[in-house]
Image (cartoon, rainbow, N blue to C red):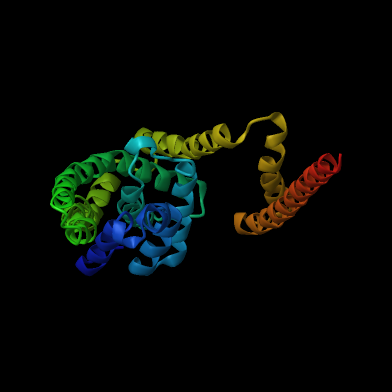
Amino acid sequence: MEISWLQAILIGLFACLSSMPGMGGTSIGNYTLGRPLIGGLVCGVILGDIATGVLVGCAMQVVYIALVTPGGTVSADVRAVSYIGIPLAMVALNSYGLSPESVEGAALATSFGTMVGTLGTVLFYGTATINLVWQHAGWQAVEKRQYKKLYVVDMVLPWISHILCSFIPTIIMCKLGADVVELIKTTLPMDGIAMKTLFTVGSLLPCVGIAILLKQIVKAAADFVPFLFGFVLAASLGINLVSATVVASMFAIINYKIKMLSAQRVAGAAATIDDDEEDI
């Protein structure tokens, strides 16, 4: 598999759009287009292999499933994972002849994503640093009451930051990444210690994402039960994660309805008590 210049440009464009304010802020940009699950679909469409793109995106999403950026603190740039790591992982899988559904394929994909994600933090902070210049220009426009200039500051000037720190690096790394992958393939054979270590570490990385997620959502021992329910379904019934998600959605709706009924009963009881107090 070789990434053409046109494909690299399209991937670079999505790397910019994944965090642009003009794309609805972080809700549509960073937290939708920027996620590996969506990025895998986008890269799969652009590179002409949707199945591999989605499977690679799923493998990488598990690692970063609970990633948050409190106060702009970023441990890994998910944009780089989605639009640099996924294309390079797809090229690597094709080069090594690995299936993305295999354990080795998923481990290789997560390893590539982690390496690129850590490197991508440099690009993230580079973008944020350049944006400080536009922020200063925005404050000057506010002080001069030139509020119409804020549209330019918010919608136009950030493109310069993203072109320099997202668009161009993504194009270069995606286009030249195939040669790097071939070099890695030649230097590090499949049966070598380095690749076996890479596969082992890559297989453990999803545990990190799941552990972070558990740390955020589990407050009591009983919270483990619904979390493990999906794994039990997958193991006993043989269903995939999409089917388990549909089943979980039904239980979530039932749980929501029960809580809403309980809240209505509490509100009704409180209203009855208030009426009794007024009668007294």
Question: Is residue 41 something one can see in this rendering?
Answer: yes
Query: Left or right: 177 with respect to 100?
Result: left
Q: Nearer the viewer, residue 189 or 141?
A: 141
Answer with the quarter of the image where residue 136 lies.
Answer: top left
Residue drawn where x is 28% and y is 40% of the image: 121
Query: Left or right: 155 with respect to 262?
Result: left
Residue drawn where x is 70% and y is 42% of the image: 226
Residue drawn where x is 49% and y is 38% of the image: 209
| Number of marks in picture | 0
Q: Nearer the viewer, residue 50 or 280?
A: 280
Point out the image quarter for the C terminus: top right
Judge whether 162 appears above or below 10 on screen: above
Query: Left or right: 248 with respect to 35?
Result: right
Q: Indicate the position of residue 101 as horizontal and vertical percent values.
A: 51, 54
Q: Nearer the viewer, residue 38 or 252?
A: 252
Q: Indicate the position of residue 259 as horizontal and vertical percent values.
A: 73, 48
Q: Indicate the position of residue 192 as horizontal and vertical percent values.
A: 36, 37
Point out the image quarter for the N terminus: bottom left
Q: Indicate the position of residue 23 as horizontal and vertical percent values.
A: 33, 61
Question: Is residue 2 something one can see in this rendering?
Answer: no
Q: Nearer the viewer, residue 164 or 231?
A: 164
